[in-house]
Structures are given as C-alpha cells and as structure tokens.
Image (cartoon, helix red, strand yellow):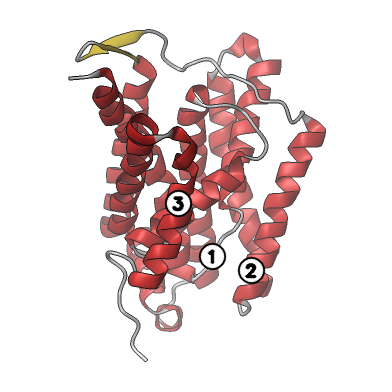
Amino acid sequence: MSDALVSFIIYGFAQGSIYSLLAMGFSLVYGVGGILNQAHGAFYVIATYIFYTSYLYLAQFGLAIGIILALIITPLVGGLIYFALIKPLKESHVGIVIVTFAFAFFVEQFVKIAVDSIYHNMPLLIPGTFDFFGLSVDNHYLLIIGIAVLLVVLVTLFINKSKLGKSIRAVAQDSEAASLMGINVDRILAYTLVISAFLASVAAILYVPEDFVRPAVGWTVLLDSFAIVILGGLGSLPGSVLGAFLISYARSFTNYFIDPTFSALIPIVVIVVVLIVRPRGIFGKKEID
C-alpha cells in the first residue's frame, strides 16, 4: 500500500476515535436535557491547559499529575456549569446557548491572559514508533485508539446497564415522568455534564500531544462535535460514533488525496447539507407534531 493510503487508514481511525469521545459527550447532554452546550469545547481547553501547565510547573512528577488533575477538575467544572449557569436558565434554550457560549469565550480569553496565545507542543505519552505497512507511526496512536475504543464501549455499557445509566435514559425519554418516579432530574442532568466533560478531558489528554496547545482549539472541537451529532442524529450515541468516523475519514481523505486546505470545510458542509437533506441525521428520530 502507498504511504498516503496507510496514513489515511491509521490517522483517520485515530482521529475518529477522538471525535467519538467528543461527540458522545455532546450528544449525551443534548439527548438527556435538550441542552445545546456551547461550552463543550471549553472543557477540552480547560483539560488541555491543566495538562500543559502541570507539565510546565510540576515536571518532576512527570505527566501523571497533569493527567490526574485534568480528569478530576474538568468534570467538576462541568457539574458546576450546570448548577451555576444552565439550571437557572433551563426553561430558556436560547439563554443556555448564550450563557454557555459566553463561558467558552471567557475560558479562551482567560488562558490567553493567564498563560499565552502561542502554540505549544506536548511530549507523547508513549514514545517510539511502529511499522504499519512500511509507514512509521507513533506508538501514541495505538494509545489513542485503544483508550478511546475502550471508553466508547464502557460508556455504552454504563448507559444501558447501570442503575444511574437507566436513570439517565429515563430522564432522556420523559423528564417529568422520571421526576414523578423519584428521580432527581437536576442531579441527572449535572451527571451528564460531568460525563461529557470527562470524555472531553480524556480526548484532550490523548490528542494534544499529537496536536498543539492553543486557546482557540475549543471552537474547532465544538464545530466538529456539532457536525458529528448533526450527521449521526442529535441525542443518538450510536449515531455519534458513526458520524465521528465518517467525518474523520472524510477529512483524512481530503488531507491525503485532495488538498488539506479544504479539510476544515468538511464539518461546515456536513452541517448545511444534513440540515437541508435529512435534519434528523442518520439515527435521529423523526419529530411527531
């Protein structure tokens, strides 16, 4: 196989794995609470900069301390965002969009002031390379694929099999009926934000060493996540995973076989085309009037 084809396969799958984590979190929050969380990319930024600043100032502890802090603090921020910003406005979908967008903008500007706006590199979590059909590929990509696939499976099992997961599904189906059954709806919605932020923080920790540390990355994450869930179907976790790999391979194909310049346009084109042709996405349910 040619190097371009091998790169298309391996890098497309790795990026699709990261997209799956991001899209599942975004879709879960929308599916359960109808919350179009514009701060989703901000979770990625928060985890990225916790990881990066820990690497800068706590290097004597290695990368582990940054990973632990990012995986603890970012989900806590997600829960706080629900109670401080979303819950007071949960009757206003427009208000939630505005306030979460404002939070995301605040996070971007804060890290520019507190750290800087220069692009930085992070070391790979696993050094070294392996040979894949004649192409030298970072071992780090194996870590990305392995952890992301494992998490997708675990989250799916958690939602379908655990007691809390069943409560989440109950709220997603009918929040009023769930409340009458004794389920604390606000707590469940907060949990979904926590899970979403956790998945975004894992995605950041895995992908930043292959990308750059940069304040504006949150908007790219938000756009990609939004395009994926629009394609797969808002609120559909299987649709999010399928959409993640479809968009990932579409971008990878553009990068290696057409022109990388056009790759960033893929999510925008997907959003416009899907909303016109099939607004509910691949697995989204048709709304009944």
Q: Is residue 90 visible?
A: no
Residue at 60%, 47% in the rendered image: 219
Residue labelled with disc 1: 36
Q: Quadrant of the C terminus?
A: bottom left
Q: Are marks 3 and 1 in contact (CB under 8 Å)?
A: no
Tell me residue 13's x, y (percent).
30, 34
Toward the right, the furthest residue is: 113
Tell me residue 45's x, y (percent).
62, 39
User: On the image, which quarter does residue 169 sit in?
Assistant: bottom left
Marker disc for residue 156: none
Dot 3 or dot 1: first in sequence order is 1
Q: CA distance from mark 3 to mark 1?
A: 17 Å
The nearer-to-camera label among 3 and 1 is 3
Residue labelled with disc 2: 96
Q: Are marks 2 and 3 in contact (CB under 8 Å)?
A: no
User: On the image, which quarter does residue 273 sit in?
Assistant: bottom left
Q: How many marks?
A: 3
Q: Amino acid at mark 3?
A: Pro
